[in-house]
Image (cartoon, rainbow, N blue to C red):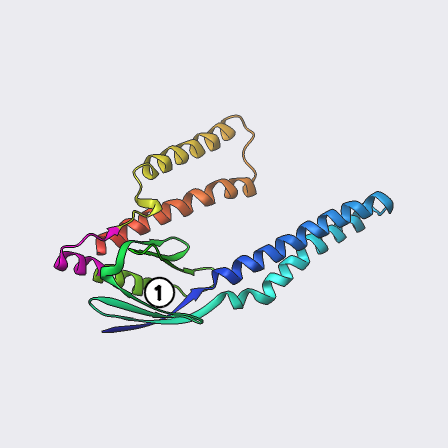
Amino acid sequence: MQEYKFEYSNQKFATKLFIICFGFFMLSFIGILGIAKFIHLPKMIFFATFLILCFGIPFFIFWLNRKKIKNSGSAKLENEKVKIVLDNEIKEIEFKQIENYLVQVYNGTLLQIKLLNGEKFKMYSNSNFCNTKEFDEFTGDLETKIQNFKEVNEITIIRKKTFFERVWIYPFLIIMTISVVIIVIYGIYKGKGIPPLKLIAVIAPILSLWAGYFGTKNRNKKE
């Protein structure tokens, strides 16, 4: 039996926190526009008020509560089952009960399991809030155990393809990369250039997707 301790994300709390922050942003935005119709404010004061209420306070609320997104959990992994202990839940899953599962590594590690009775189990360790190393190790070993159990017992357990394993993702990345390169070269050729912030905004998502793609390939090779 192998034992693990890891950090994982409280997705329910993270969703509630996002809704609260977004709701405060919308109320502040509507309120400021409404007040501006009746009270004339100098542009600088209006702009400063807009930034503080619409962005500053929601960010402050998020910053104060961000650590609550991270929880600690543990797991015990055996040849035929896994026991996962979370902050408010203990889940024991026998591999013979699994219909399909997914392990995806991108900005953290996602684990999804669907049982034969239709029940679903989902966990996510977000790299923005958690140290994902231990959870990544656990999910890798769990995947190996499930595959070994499947082969030994000759049963069907479907391993769902991750986002980066889908057939269309590689051509899509190639096309997107070529498009960005053409845009940059065209801008330089016309003497217009591209502002650094816009260039970063365009390139960063592509680099992030390529990193996820090669990370998935390397993980599959190790397995």
- Residue 53's image quarter? bottom right
Residue at image point 56% right, 30% down? 192
Where is 109 relative to 26, above or below?
Answer: below
* Side of 57 where 212 appears, left or right: left
Residue at the spot x=37%, y=45% of the render?
210
- Total labels drawn: 1
**What's the magenta bit mostly, secondary-structure-wise?**
helix
Query: Could you say whether the residue bearing mark 1 is in a helix, strand or loop?
Result: helix
Q: Residue at x 30, y 61 (%)?
A: 139
How packed mark 1 is, by other alpha carbons closer than 10 Å (few <14, some 14-19, many 20 or more), is: many
Residue 55: percent from the left, percent from the top? 66, 54
Horizontally, residue 191 falls left or right of residue 52, namely left
**Residue for badge 1:** 135
Residue 57, magenta (yes or no):
no
Q: Position of residue 70 (x, y in %)?
A: 47, 67
Decide which of 130, 2 is in the foreground and name it: 2
In the image, is 158 to the left or to the right of 51?
left
Rendered-image quadrant of the C terminus:
bottom left
- For image coordinates 82% across by 48% down, the residue present is 35
| Quadrant (top left/top right/bottom left/bottom right) for the N terminus | bottom left
- In the image, residue 155 lies in the stretch drawn in magenta: yes
**Image position of 73 (left or right of 99):** right
Segment tinted magenta in the rendering: 146-158
Residue type at numbered disc 1 = Phe
Of 60 and 159, the residue lying toward us: 159
Q: Residue 154: x percent and y percent?
A: 13, 55
Q: Between 152 and 167, which is closer to the camera in this rendering? A: 152
